[in-house]
Image (cartoon, rainbow, N blue to C red):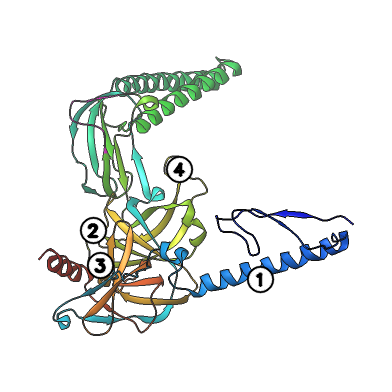
Amino acid sequence: MKYRVLTAQTSGKPLPGERGSAHRAVASAEPRPSGNACRRISIVVALALVLVLAGCGARAASDPAAPAAALAPATTVESVPDRNVVTVTNPERFPLAPAAARRESDQILANGAVAADVGRSYAVNALSSGRVVEVRVRLGDDVQKGQLLLTMTSPDMSQAFADYQKFQADAALAKTQLDRVRLLYSHGASPQKDVEVAEGTFHKANIDAQSAEQRILLLGGDPRRPSPLIEIHAPVGGTIVEQNVTSAAGVKSLDNSPNLFTIADLSNVWILCDVYENDLAHVHLGDRATIELNAYPDRHMAGRVTNISKLLDPNTRAAKVRIELPNPAGLLRPNMFASVHFVAQGTAARTVIPASAVLRLQDRDWVFVKLDGAQFRRTEVAAGPVNADKTQQILSDLRPGDHVVADALMFDREVQKSTEQ
């Protein structure tokens, strides 16, 4: 039988049963464990180690003075005041307005200008070249049909009168010859063919004279008063909206000269607006439109959309929308600036507040909503169009029943002053 010798390192003290400084001990006679026994021992040791480690972890977690807990910094929570909530003294100084809910039509705001009706505008031109002698009217004058506008000399008129007088003389001579041939034919002294030739000559002379007379009338002259002067008269009544001629100015031929005058009947006018392509889907033929003019801020004129252009301006990406308005009093003048509200035919529920309650800052719209006590909250909203009654539609972020400051600009100024102080 074999015996196993075990050695143990000590700290200088003799083991029990040893004498002096001996460092060896002979184990009791015991057989060496088998392989299965070794495996059982290893499993037991492993289980014991797991239990020991679990106990250490639980003890470390329950111990507030554990090293891991000591390393974690203490967490502090700081409250930050809401910058959109403001407190004012004497809040009764600022009148409030309730947000109301009502049915409103979708609206689009566009800029436009007054223009003359093209169908009622007439160009005045001279059919011959020459030089102006006198101008009787000026830009912006009202004229009547047939009124004299200007007088000019024309070499074409002189030539037309010369031709007319010559053809009249030829016609008179042909008439005399025809009468003579007819007398001779009646006495048998002239053949029939001479009569026919004389009649043809007389008819051709009359045609030439009539053509010359028509040319004089076309150039603006009077065949009964031979003169190189041409008088230009107004073809219709209206207002002179364009003038391209002055006294002593030369007038070119019709094919390469601008209009001498343009006369427009301003009893009906157009409002031409630029509507961008993003808003074209909301504008339809027959939609109502409210027009406000800078010249008459207290007047609101109503019209309807009569035409929407099929073409877009390549530079502005906008289409021309036309509104026709009657203008019996002549208040609307061409090129006046206009603000136009297009009103769609359908309606939808909208929140409405006074337009003065909306503050526009950095391309964003804000209102001041009343809270408890002297506090107000500055709230960003999606503002819609301004109605004719000076109310503004709010599309979102404001509920009916909320009370807002009626004059947002004055309230904001007071808040700024109190902040600076």
Q: Quadrant of residue 197?
A: top right
The reply to whether residue 308 is in sight is: no
Instruction: Check disc 1 and report the residue beneath it.
Output: 51
Q: Nearer the viewer, residue 285 or 388?
A: 388
Name the amino acid, label 4: Asp
Give the residue at x 39% y 53%.
273
Q: Nearer the viewer, mark 3 or mark 2?
A: 2
Q: CA distance from mark 4 to mark 3?
A: 30 Å
For disc 3, the marked residue is 299
**Secondary element at image label 1:** helix
In this picture, is 134 found above or below 70? above
Q: Would you say residue 250 sits in the magenta stretch?
A: yes
Task: Please state which of the two labelled residues, at mark 2 or mark 1, is closer to the viewer.
Answer: 1
* Foreground: disc 3 or disc 1: 1
**Residue depicted at x 36% and y 84%:** 401
Residue 143 locus on image (x, y percent): 24, 48
Q: Disc 2 on helix, strand or loop?
A: loop
Q: Which residues are magenta?
A: 243-252
Q: Nearer the viewer, mark 4 or mark 3?
A: 4
Q: Residue at x 21, y 46 (%)?
A: 140
**Amino acid residing under circle 1:** Leu
Marked residue nearer the N-terminal end (3 or 2)? 2
**Vertical placement of residue 265 versus 285, above or below:** above
- Three-letter amino acid code at disc 2? Asn
